[in-house]
Amino acid sequence: MATHSIVYGFELLLRHITPEKFYVEACDDGADDVLIIDRVSTEVTLSVKKDIPPSAVTRPIFGILGTIHLVAGNYLIVITKKKKIGEFFNHVIWKATDFDVLSYKKTMLHLTDIQLQDNKTFLAMMNHVLSMDGFYFSTTYDLTHTLQRLSNTSPEFQEMSLLERADQRFVWNGHLLRELSAQPEVHRFALPVLHGFITMHSCSINGKYFDWILISRRSCFRAGVRYYVRGIDSEGHAANFVETEQIVHYNGSKASFVQTRGSIPLYWSQRPNLKYKPLPLINKVANHMDGFQRHFDSQIIIYGKQVIINLVNQKGSEKPLEQAFATMVSSLGNGMIRYLTRNLLLDRLAGFGMRMFIQICFSYFLVDPAGAVLSNQEGVFRSNCMDCLDRTNVIQSLLARRSLQAQLQRLGVLHVGQKLEEQDEFEKIYKNAWADNANACAKQYAGTGALKTDFTRTGKRTQLGLIMDGWNSLIRYYKNNFSDGFRQDSIDLFLGNYSVDELESHSPLSVPRDLKFLALPIIMVVAFSMCIICLLMAGDTWTETLAYVLFWGVASIGTFFIILYNGKDFVDAPRLVQKEKID
């Protein structure tokens, strides 16, 4: 198996600030490099430690996330706190937990009041994304590629920096690093950062110790929030696309099983309009086949054969999407693609077992301690439900379990006839890890933890699980309608889908937001509060109290239905990027 990158990043850095320059000093053993950023000209140069002025203000940092241009000028974003996740083949994996956003400008006196307000809003957007959980990095290991992809590389690839060789689908700070990317000599200061979920566990079965790792890589292409980013774009990138890799490391042998999830690859939308489940709309005039083929052409090039597992309902509002998806697969007529609905999947599994089904379809990647490849994964299961979250995660955890069963038996960890389900200690680790993975993916896309995690953790639905699902559904409803516009704008700004131009006569933020979208939550909160107050402070008679309660109850319900009649006027919609129009 090929070795990993020779051009490593720096593990420990010091940030020095003077009124004129930022200095980033490499503190690894033997390192003398210093990155200098001119705060006036924005020029980036490489120097040595003796050039750092003694008067500079110093603080330790753990990486440069990149730079962003806002109304006030450029900002430098650095990682100030990190948490160790574990070691990955002797490479340390970190989660970035806190950041500093440093202005190149020493003063804001050059800005008007309107520009100051816009800049403050843009900074709030950047800080919102930085506050999202799930940013991971390593200074010595390429987290963006699967084990199988890393095993099939050239010597030239191995000599590239981590930034150069990274899979750009999963580099969430790619836009922020664009200036450093243009200068290969400073690449050791530029860390590619993954967004998603990583967990590592040292496990034991039958007295044999192995490492079990789960990595979910969230694509930065067509990224966004639940209802504002659906389907595909003109390049074939699917919304909420996530590559999940399960890895086993035992006595030097390494095994990997990869799955993908992504939105139904058609041009469709489901914009919030205050209804609990807005009606999905399929674009009537778009060339669906063009985008559909682009999507699967790229998937086949990267992963090989595709087994689509479409978990959307075959009735109700989801039915047209399921039918359209099936029709597109049939029309494409590509022998590398197989299509299964939930019912077909269950029939197939019942027919000859999930483990056999996985092995017949794809097998898995396996390399021995000497680096010899014993088997390759020849394709992936591509799962989706409407959100590619809850139902999808349940199915992925079941498929991954059967693959893991086969891997551990082949490696000699499990005896013949033993089942993972019988290994109580490992089962707890496995179920909780997949439930944590579900929660991470759900929070990043829908704004709350996942639904149905009680089933993932325990194998059955529980009363507490149903209550938590109801609570999360309520929070999702609120966020999807009243805060997701800001969340979507924040992601678009962070990823470079929108670039700030301070010379624009009218920024999108200068367009007054229709404050009607605040009406529903305010009125409902006031009405509910009044009902509670009436109950707590009863009048002279229960008749009087009941009258107050009925008045405020009817007022709140009536207002709700009035607003619901034209709900789209009350939601918090994005302002920075014009989304596709759906007919």
Image (cartoon, rainbow, N blue to C red):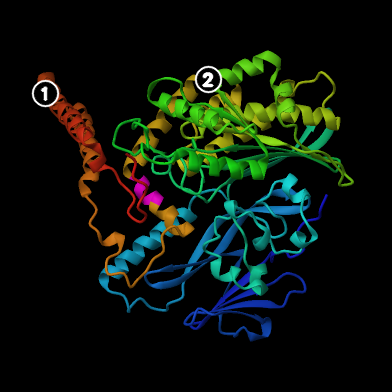
Residue positioned 46% across, 48% down in the render: 234
Q: Is residue 9 magenta?
A: no
Location of residue 172 with respect to 69 vertically, above or below: above
Q: Which image quadrant is residue 559 in?
A: top left
Q: Which mark is residue 515?
A: none
Location of residue 47 with respect to 412 vertically, above or below: below
Q: Which mark is residue 461?
A: 2
Q: Residues within 10 Å of mark 2 (few under 14, many from 20)?
A: some
Residue 28, position as x, y percentages in the image: 73, 69
Of the two numbered discs 1 and 2 on the same chain, state the one appearing first in sequence.
Answer: 2
Depth order, front residue of 469/190: 190
Task: Name the element at disc 1.
Answer: helix
Judging by the rendered image, the residue that carries numbered circle 1 is 547
- On the question of residue 240 being in view, the answer is yes
* Residue at the right extreme of this rendering: 370
Q: Which image quadrant is residue 318 in?
A: top left
In the picture, measured across the screen, residue 508 lies left or right of residue 351, that is left
Q: Which residue type carries mark 1?
A: Ala
Depth order, front residue of 311/130: 311
Q: Which residue type carries mark 2?
A: Arg
Q: Nearer the viewer, mark 1 or mark 2?
A: 2
Span shown in magenta: 483-488
Residue positioned 46% across, 54% down in the render: 129
Task: Name the element at disc 2.
Answer: loop
